[in-house]
Amino acid sequence: ESLEQPGVAPKEALAKLSEMENALQEMQKQLSTGSTEKQIKEVGEALSLSEATAAAGDAMSKGDLQKAAAELSSMELPKLDRKTEKAVTEKLEQAERNAAASSKNQDVKKSIEKMRQGLSKGDKAAFEDGARSLAKECEIQAQKKQLSELLKKQAQSLGECKAECEGEARAVAQGPNKGGNKAGKGSGGDQRG
């Protein structure tokens, strides 16, 4: 708003644009979802080992968080053979340990723990509660990712605006060039042709 006022000095405008750019970058940092996405992908790898949970697992592994959330929301405790159950449980346990090491998002760790315990004990309620909690985390991460993309685009637009403003400021600082680059080379004598 203050930049739209007539007579704003170029230095003042550039300072304000830089301030806005820094604020957008700070917001992007706060939305960083790297470690949580890694945890979700790890759970996806575990769930991909079973045909019954593969749809959610594949979506999680590929980073398709909206689809993963939808699949997890409707997931029920699968009936697995002992070998598959052991493989999935071990992978979930590894994902749980890795999530515990990252202090950023303990909700993902709790969700993994519920799913693992539900699967290993045949506790339908615990497994499904863990799956629903993980679905919510996937939705949150999808929203953060989308917001981060929008902030990135906004920062790019701001950068372009800043570059344009810098160019205009340089042009104003150089002042008008009288005579152009051909000064002194005009035709002499009679102009009648």
Image (cartoon, rainbow, N blue to C red):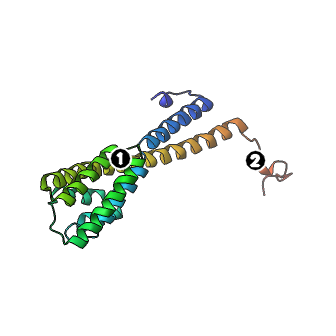
Q: Which numbered mark, 2 or 1, is in the foreground of this view? A: 1
* Quadrant of the drawing holding the C terminus: bottom right
Q: Nearer the viewer, residue 178 or 97?
A: 97
Q: Are marks 2 and 1 in contact (CB under 8 Å)?
A: no
Residue at 19 percent across and 72 percent down: it is 81
* Quadrant of the drawing holding the N terminus: top left
Residue at 28 percent across and 53 percent down: it is 112
Quarter of the rendering containing residue 56 = bottom left
Residue at 13 percent across and 56 percent down: it is 124
Disc 1 crowd, CA 10 A, few/some/many (<14, 14-19, 20+): some
Note whether 176 is above or below 5 in the view shown: below
Note whether 175 is above or below 73 in the view shown: above
Whether residue 140 appears in this view of the structure is no
Query: In the image, residue 63 lies at what x, y percent?
Result: 35, 60
Disc 2 crowd, CA 10 A, few/some/many (<14, 14-19, 20+): few
Residue at 56 percent across and 41 percent down: it is 162
Cα distance in 3D space between marks 2 and 1: 53 Å
Query: In the image, residue 183 lies at what x, y percent?
Result: 81, 48
Note whether 35 is above or below 48 in the view shown: above
Q: Which of 177 and 37 is in front in this view?
A: 37
N-terminal-most mark, 2 or 1: 1
Query: In the image, residue 8 lies at what x, y percent?
Result: 56, 28
Secondary structure under tag 1 reads helix
Whether residue 12 appears in this view of the structure is yes
Q: Residue 180 carries which label?
A: 2
Q: Which amino acid does label 1 sit on?
A: Lys
Q: Which amino acid does label 2 sit on?
A: Gly
Secondary structure under tag 2 reads helix
Q: Residue 144 carries which label?
A: 1
